[in-house]
Image (cartoon, rainbow, N blue to C red):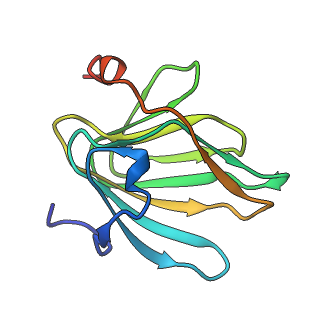
Amino acid sequence: MSDTLFPKGGPNPSGAYFTGQSYLSALSETGVQIFNVTFEPGCRNFWHIHHAKSGGGQILLCTSGRGWYQEWGQEPRELRPGDAVNIPSEVKHWHGAANDSEFVHVAVEVPGEDYSTQWCEPVSDEEYSKLP
């Protein structure tokens, strides 16, 4: 996709926790960590949880393409450029591209005490294939 706001970056170092290919570009690693994440069509990350004793979580700012976000036990939410998602700590979720579109978002890691990410199971092909 040629109309991205920020650099695409190289292959995502967390790629083992993604189905499909994603790319990562660090925009800021001082103070607040901010990353540009590019998902090829059909790429999505595994279910995961951002843990923190206080604070923490993640904010997604969608910049290009079409994607999805889903919290455990909730219906998936379609994402388009201009959408923002505020993900509190301790919420199990996943996000990624639609099957027919590349998807790009800026991920802002909200600072928190004892912040960590727990990677869980992949989003099943069966569940993902139900998305329009």
Residue drawn at x 58%, y 71% as measured from the top left? 33
Farthest residue in the bottom direction? 30
Where residue 130 sits in the image (x, y, percent)? 29, 16
Where residue 129 sits in the image (x, y, percent)? 26, 21
- Name the side, left or right, on which 15 lies relative to 116: left
Q: In which quarter of the image is residue 101?
A: top left
Quadrant in which the C terminus appears: top left
- Answer above or below: position of 62 versus 41: below
Task: Count every numbered label the image shows and give the total.
Answer: 0
- Answer above or below: position of 16 versus 121: below
- Name the side, left or right, on which 131 lies relative to 118: left
- Answer above or below: position of 3 versus 70: below
Where residue 35 sits in the image (x, y, percent)? 46, 68
Where residue 29 sits in the image (x, y, percent)? 57, 79
Quadrant in which the N terminus appears: bottom left
Residue drawn at x 55%, y 20% as measured from the top left? 74
Residue drawn at x 31%, y 17% as measured from the top left? 126
In this view, the residue in front, 116 or 131, is 116
Residue drawn at x 35%, y 41% as measured from the top left? 44
- Name the side, left or right, on which 128 lies relative to 106: left
